[in-house]
Amino acid sequence: MGEFLPANLKLLCSHYRSVAEVCRKIRINRGQFNKYLCGNSVPTPFNLKRICDFFGVEAFEITLPTEQFITLIGVKSRKTSHSGEGTESQKMLEHLRRKSSPELKAHIGYYYEYYHAMTEPGSILCSLVHVRVDGPDVVYERNERLQIAGVEGEFERYRYVGTAYYLRDRLFLIDYESLTSNEISQTILIPSFKSCITRLNGLKMGVSAADHRAPACSRVVWEYLGQEINRSDAYRRVRLYDVNDPAIDEDLRARLAQAMVVHGLFVIA
């Protein structure tokens, strides 16, 4: 199994910023992973499945001769680009674009997003969101970072990109994690009809980044920052907070708590 694995693994890692980032995302020991890259060791069946699931390949594919593996990855990419499903997806997106209200553009700008962290229950995660116009679409980028336990000042970083729509007095936002492409999340917000946007309430559904990959739904609040901000200063606030942290004010804490299960439905109170 190990003859072609190191070269194929290096090829897959080359699509990321660093091997260290890949190890953090997979949650695998860096020293052990280096042994796989050098050919000094082969993954256990459990670790091999984790690696393959992360990169979106099958176990038998990652052990193919490297030239064949490169061709296979290219074929997969072309099939994704030219399949009939892609055509139907474009039709769906065009339909949603036509139905979306121009009022969506009133919500262009930067926001802090707060919600109950799916990976760290009992914590509140603050992320930085930028909603902007991109041709005929309104798109957004959401940046998160999670503290690495036991390592002061070190964070795992996540970048989500997505599209926003305004349908029947609700904001619908759907995005995917662009560094690993292993997660999609959806957010629904209740727009502000005031002349000045401050905080928007809603619900967020996604999947925990932990190994159990549990689907979860949380109350979410977007706090408007403006159309132009100092990104470096704003990014310093992006992190996990304890629910009782003074940085989470009473209004924000109350908004995040205003959800309940009614007849089996998780709704905003």
Image (tube, rainbow, N blue to C red):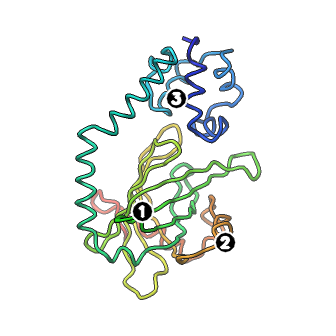
**Left or right of residue 157, residue 78 in this image:** left
User: Which quadrant would residue 203 be assigned to in this image?
Assistant: bottom left
User: Which quadrant would residue 168 be assigned to in this image?
Assistant: bottom left
Residue toward you, 138 or 60: 138
Residue toward you, 186 or 93: 93
Q: CA distance from mark 2 to mark 3?
A: 38 Å
Secondary structure beneath dot 1 equals strand
Q: CA distance from mark 1 to mark 2?
A: 32 Å
Q: Residue at x 30, y 38 (%)?
A: 82
Give the labeled residue for mark 1: 139
Give the labeled residue for mark 3: 50
User: Which quadrant would residue 22 be assigned to in this image?
Assistant: top right
Q: Are marks 1 and 2 in contact (CB under 8 Å)?
A: no
Q: Residues within 10 Å of mark 3 (few under 14, many from 20)?
A: some
Secondary structure beneath dot 3 equals helix
Where is the N terminus found, in terms of image quarters? top right
Give the labeled residue for mark 2: 246
Q: Residue at x 42, y 51 (%)?
A: 206
Percent coordinates x, y for residue 144 in the rendering: 57, 56
Q: Which of the two discs, 2 and 3, labels the residue nearer the N terminus?
A: 3
